[in-house]
Image: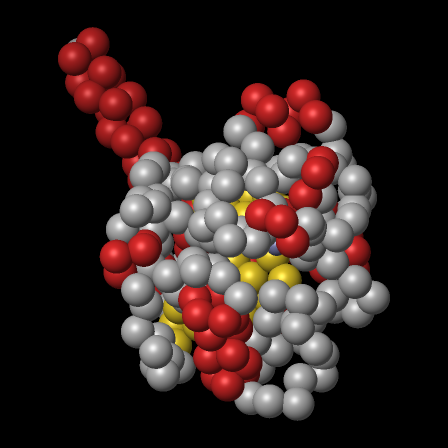
């Protein structure tokens, strides 16, 4: 009798576990429609190979800081940005970001997540950024531009909105797409919304940035506090 009761109890526990694990409705990354056909230039794999991603620990949100509305198409904008990051201004091997989101609602594949992102700013380690408090908004300094990946940038998957969002938000389509992408990336790498950060939160004060723009940051966080959950992160949580 006792054995039977134990078996019933264990099957109840197992069924609860499986119900629980089905609650997450987020798509797998592989199910998302991601455009990887925008390039007119191949990445420089020799440069990229010097900066492997390592274990993915964070998702970091950015803006490309390009004009909105844009006078060129999203794909042309990506080609222009890649040219700047790889050839003209910097030597970063490819476009700096792993994923980009256009106001059309399209997700674009940037550099491979096998490689670290690139940045003009210095990424702090987690203990550093936690003790440094909130980085002040400011302009990234140009003197670091030639350095591929200053600071502790490996382990950050970067998601960047195409445009500039200090005073206005991206389109509803872009916001919706971004929450689905972030949820899928969190699922893919066994992370949670507490592993989502915004560029301004994790950089050295000398290279402080207001990326991803005040309006967009407020939409995600609700208030300017690392760890706060605003409308955007709530949407990520329920996906
Ligand atoms: Zn940024």
- Residue 21 image offset from top left, x and y in percent: 37, 42
Numbered circles on residues, count: 0
| Residue drawn at 58 percent across, 40 percent down | 122
Residue 79, x across and y down, in percent: 46, 79
Question: In this rendering, does residue 61 appear at all?
Answer: no
Corner quadrant of residue 52: top left
The residue that appears at 53% across and 66% down in the rendered structure is 89
Q: Position of residue 155 (x, y in %)?
A: 41, 40
Using the rendered image of the protein, determine whether residue 48 is visible from the camera's viewpoint: yes
Where does residue 229 sit, x and y in percent of width and height?
69, 43
Residue closer to the observer: 219 or 53:
53
* Ligand 1: image quarter: bottom right
Compared with 115, 64 (above or below) is below
Pick whichever, 161 or 49, lies toward us: 49
Residue at 68%, 56% (x, y): give it: 212
Above-or-below relation of 109 to 8: below
Left or right position of 75 against 29: right
Q: Quadrant of the N terminus?
A: top left
Q: How is the image coloured?
A: secondary structure
Residue lying at the far top of the rendered structure: 2
| Nearest to the observer: residue 22 or residue 162 | 162
């Amino acid at each position: 009798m006792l054995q039977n009761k134990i078996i019933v109890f264990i099957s109840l526990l197992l069924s609860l576990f499986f119900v629980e694990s089905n609650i997450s409705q987020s798509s797998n990354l592989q199910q998302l429609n991601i455009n990887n056909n925008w390039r007119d230039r191949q990445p420089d794999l020799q440069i990229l190979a010097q900066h492997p991603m390592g274990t993915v620990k964070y998702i970091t949100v950015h803006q490309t800081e390009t004009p909105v509305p844009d006078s060129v198409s999203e794909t042309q904008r990506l080609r222009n940005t890649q040219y700047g990051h790889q050839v003209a201004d910097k030597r970063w091997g490819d476009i700096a970001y792993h994923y980009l989101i256009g106001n059309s609602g399209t997700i674009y594949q940037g550099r491979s997540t096998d490689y670290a992102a690139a940045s003009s700013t210095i990424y702090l380690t987690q203990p550093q950024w936690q003790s440094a408090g909130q980085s002040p908004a400011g302009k990234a300094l140009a003197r670091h531009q030639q350095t591929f990946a200053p600071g502790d940038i490996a382990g950050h998957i970067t998601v960047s909105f195409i445009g500039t969002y200090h005073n206005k938000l991206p389109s509803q389509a872009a916001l919706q797409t971004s929450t689905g992408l972030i949820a899928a990336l969190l699922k893919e790498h066994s992370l949670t919304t507490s592993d989502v950060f915004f560029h301004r939160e994790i950089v050295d004060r000398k290279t402080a940035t207001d990326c991803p723009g005040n309006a967009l940051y407020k939409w995600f966080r609700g208030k300017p506090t690392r760890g706060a959950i605003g409308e955007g992160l709530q949407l990520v949580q329920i996906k």
